[in-house]
Image (spheres, helix red, strand yellow):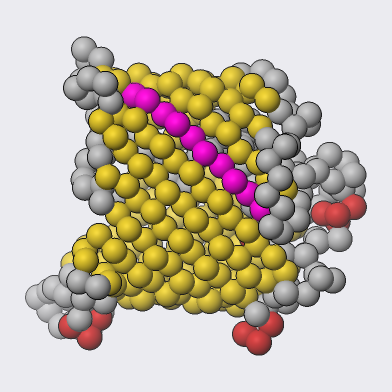
Amino acid sequence: MIGGGFSTDSGAFANVVMGQENFDIKRWRRPHLLQGAGQKVRLKTVAGGKYKNYRLDFEEPWLLDRKLKLTTSLYAEEMSYYSTKFDVDQTGFDIGLERTLLGNDFLRGKIYFTLEEVGLTEMKSNASTELKNEAGHDFVGLLGGRLAYDTRGGGDLPTHGQITSFDLQVAPSVIGSDKPFYGYHLKSTWYFKGLREGHVLELRGQNAVVDSFESSKNVPYLYRHHLGGSRNLRGFDFNEVGPRGDQNDYLRGQTMAHASLEYSVPTPWDILRVATFYDIGSVNKGAYDFDFGNYNDDWGIGLRLQIPFLGPLRLDYAFPISSDGYNDSGGNINVNFGYTTRF
């Protein structure tokens, strides 16, 4: 597959994907070379002015002939859309095991292990002192677990059900982490039928905390939390909401809370839905700092378009209501693929 796209967070990009949905890593004979076991393999390249991604994924849905999914990934990313004063890169490997739990297909559990190098590069001289002190790369060895409960069913836009997940991550020095830390992330989205046929109410909320095991070391930048952009606080630019440094740079924080409400309705045209929404959230510098006094919120309107050959597209225009004092007060346009918003 060859294509391209645009996101208001990361800009324009082109991609090339080579995939096989019925792969067999053990079949080395013809006529069906490397095919037949239902495994999935995908090689993906994404290139844009602000974002580059190279990724090789492999999935075995029935490991050892059990209902146990094995996933592995090799990846390298370069991102320049986080700030005008530095770039971000991330290179690593992860492996995970996932399966249903308690005989319930709606409930899934996953454990995963990640080894990666993350860092801030190309740091400008006018960056904040706090960010200059973090320039360079950190090695992260991370163990994680996830519980997820999903009753939404299929379709581009669910009309009922929910998806809730809880992630717990630990990156101790014993497996090589330069800056040992731990954290959790709780996310939940609920869908309800609206007042009339075809109306959908979507409620989303999330809370996350990350903290260092060593008070003398910061949690790595990419593992700290932020808000702003097309996936949460749509009235503010990507990465814009949160604590600032001495040069007004975005530092990200260790405690984050966010919620959104969206109501969408169909139109006489099958390819078009209209939505209105409200977002609210807060990011605080310290761990377990749940003070919500410095919150940001916005409201807006949006279009949901079913584009032939491209699929569903979201167009949102949001207006800030309350700000922490650092951000623009003007409207903000957001473009993203998919009717539902991923965290």
Q: Residue furthest top?
A: 268
User: Which is nearer the eye, 121 or 235?
Assistant: 235
The answer to whether 342 is drawn above or below residue 170 in the figure is above
Horizontal and vertical percent for residue 213?
73, 74
- Residue at coordinates 21% horizontally, 47% vertically from top-left? 153
Residue 83 shown left or right of residue 256 in the figure: right
Can you see residue 286? yes
As drawn, 12 above or below 112: above
Q: Can I make out residue 273 in this image?
A: no
Q: Is residue 283 left or right of residue 205?
A: right
Residue at the (69%, 82%) spot, across then down:
173
Instruction: Give the residues drawn in magenta, as a range.
Output: 255-264
Query: Which one is nearer the viewer's eye here, 225 or 125?
Result: 225
Residue 262 is one of the magenta-drawn residues: yes
The residue closer to the viewer here, 182 or 96, is 182
**Residue beneath the point at 54% across and 22% down:** 299
Compared with 9, 176 (above or below) is below
In front: 170, or 196?
Answer: 196
Residue found 43% across the figure and 67% down from its top: 146
Q: 266 left or right of 14?
A: left
Main secondary-structure element of the magenta-colored stretch? strand
* 5 shown above or below 41: above
Q: Position of residue 190 (x, y in %)?
A: 35, 42
> Looking at the rendering, which quadrant does residue 63 occupy?
bottom left
Q: Position of residue 62 (x, y in %)?
A: 21, 76
